Amino acid sequence: MVFTWLLYKTLKFRQQKILYNKRALRVDIADSVFKKSLGLMYRERIGNDGMLFISDHDEKYGIWMLNMKFKIDILWLDKSGRVVSVKESAQPCASIFNCDVYRPDKKARYVLELAAGACKKHGIRKGSKFLLRQVS
């Protein structure tokens, strides 16, 4: 736990803009093993609009909410940026012994974590399309 907290204090996440329905979202990029493992742990709030986990191959990536302090919407995207699975309002957990792992219906290349309620607010659902190229 001390190691994880230290990572939180020292890792710097680069930021990027992605597009959904002509709306730019600023996300932190998790593109290393350490950044993916840390994710949004220990943060008081999501910051920016969310976090995008980038992988180099398709898989059914599991997400858990250990040491999180708020709910999030989790979206799994294929390599073209299309949403293949959604979990709305995923609940935080405090113990590894009682922590759900959320998995997509299909393999995905990316995982996008947004503030809880973002899917409803912006009409995001399975089949929605994000433009993931850098726009700034």
Image: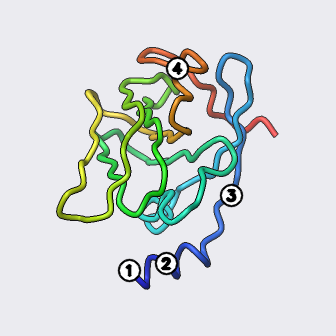
Residue located 28% across and 42% down the image: 102
Q: Quadrant of the N terminus?
A: bottom left
Residue located 48% across and 58% down the image: 39
The Cα atoms of the two marked residues, 4 and 3, are separated by 27 Å
Residue 18 in the figure: left or right of residue 65: right
Which element is circle 2 on? helix
| Three-letter residue code for mark 2 | Trp
In front of the other: 65 or 79: 65
Q: Is residue 100 above or below residue 14?
A: above
Q: Which disc, if any, is residue 1?
A: 1
Percent position of residue 123, x then y: 55, 15
The Cα atoms of the two marked residues, 2 and 4, are separated by 32 Å
Which element is circle 1 on? loop
Percent position of residue 135, x then y: 77, 35
Which element is circle 4 on? helix
Q: Are marks 2 and 4 in contact (CB under 8 Å)?
A: no
Q: Are marks 2 and 3 in contact (CB under 8 Å)?
A: no
Instruction: Pick whichever of labels 3 and 1 is earlier in the sequence.
Output: 1
Q: Quadrant of residue 97?
A: bottom left
The Cα atoms of the two marked residues, 2 and 1, are separated by 6 Å
Q: Which disc, if any, is residue 5?
A: 2
Residue bearing the label numbered 3: 14
Q: Residues within 10 Å of mark 2 (few under 14, many from 20)?
A: few
Instruction: Pick whichever of labels 2 and 4 is earlier in the sequence.
Output: 2
In front of the other: 57 or 106: 106
Residue located 46% across and 17% down the image: 125
Instruction: Pick whichever of labels 4 and 3 is earlier in the sequence.
Output: 3
Residue bearing the label numbered 4: 120
The Cα atoms of the two marked residues, 3 and 1, are separated by 24 Å
| Three-letter residue code for mark 3 | Arg
Q: Residues within 10 Å of mark 3 (few under 14, many from 20)?
A: few
